Image (spheres, helix red, strand yellow):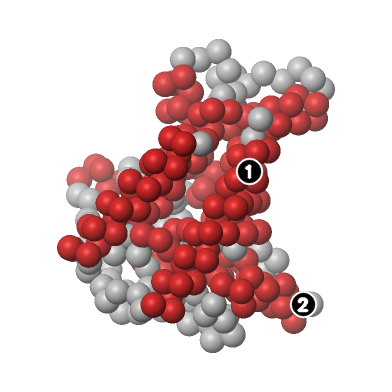
Amino acid sequence: MSTLLIILVVSVVAFALLETAFGARKRADARHVRTDMAYVASDFVGNLAVHALRPAFPMALAWLLGQAWRGPAAGWHPLAQFALGALVLEWAIWFAHRCWHRYDVLYPFHAVHHAATHVYFLSGLRQHPVQFVSEQVFFALLLTLVGVQPELVGLLAALQMVLAFFTHSNLDVRLRGPLKYVLASPRFHVLHHDRSGRGDYKNLGGGLSLFDWLFGTALDPDEVTPPEALGSGDPSIPPGWRGQLLWPFRALRGAS
Ligand SMILES: [Zn+2]
């Protein structure tokens, strides 16, 4: 856990400094940042819960799969497990993100992420606890199924968080050449937060753009103009954390 905490603190300081020096858009006001900080705290609590559950995932899977499951990568070198795990996790992020947008019963929980009118490195952590915890459990189960050791699952989650800081960051970074088709850049991901809605089903990847290009959900930042405004534009979503916590349940009740 201490390694993860060090990675978190170092990356928070680094991105805060980089955005102060090179920020491309207007900074979020104090109220916006307060909501983000509440999400950082609730994600942290969610993370502790998932971390505590993590050693139980292999046992739960073995039990579910008839006590005999050993993932295909279980005997691999840890580095190879890490590389395969990173790819599997990135596909899972792309797939889950598509589901959060696609299904009416899921979207309200993801809508609070899109309610952010300022997108900067902490926006990646603006996730409703229902989304945060269910995704972390889904990712950890999938990686366990593949055979990735539980210790590496935690490290992969940390890497994914740092990449989310980068892709949400208020830095006008553009990737060129073949790299553009593999890694997601802030310019690539910010199109997904365009208030106009043109990026709603586009640029869904976490740290990679690869799966968006492969599955036809990429919007090329070199071919379109940058967004004029960010956010979902839905006035019914409250600006504060507490209101956003309850909002998806109200929205679902209202829709039924
Ligand atoms: Zn989204």
Q: From this viewpoint, is residue 117 visible?
A: no
Q: Nearer the viewer, mark 1 or mark 2?
A: 1
Q: Amino acid at mark 2?
A: Arg
Please report contact status of discs 1 and 2: CB closer than 8 Å, yes or no.
Answer: no
Q: Please state the horizontal and vertical placement of residue 225, each as a whole percent of the image.
A: 26, 72
Mark toward the start of the polypeptide (1 vs 2): 1
Residue 67 image label = none
- Taking the view exactly as shown, the residue that stands out farthest to the bottom is 235
Image point (40%, 46%), residue name: 8
* Residue under pointer 1: 50
Q: Please state the horizontal and vertical placement of residue 215, each as a whole percent of the image.
A: 46, 49
- Taking the view exactly as shown, the residue that stands out farthest to the left is 21
Q: Amino acid at mark 1?
A: Val
Q: Please state the horizontal and vertical placement of residue 10, each as a whole percent of the image.
A: 33, 46
What is the distance, in whole Å, between disc 1 and disc 2 at their CAs? 28 Å
Label 2: which secondary element: helix
Q: Is mark 2 within 8 Å of ligand 1?
A: no
Q: From this viewpoint, is residue 181 visible?
A: yes
Dividing the picture into quadrants, the one containing residue 228 is bottom left
Q: Is residue 41 above or below residue 256?
A: above
Q: Nearer the viewer, residue 202 or 64?
A: 64
Image point (36%, 59%), residue name: 121
Image point (67%, 68%), residue name: 104
Where is the C terminus found, in terms of image quarters? bottom right
- Taking the view exactly as shown, the residue that stands out farthest to the front is 2
Q: Is residue 149 above or below residue 233?
A: above
Q: Is residue 189 above or below residue 231?
A: above
Q: In the figure, is residue 65 to the left or right of 98? A: right
* Residue under pointer 2: 253
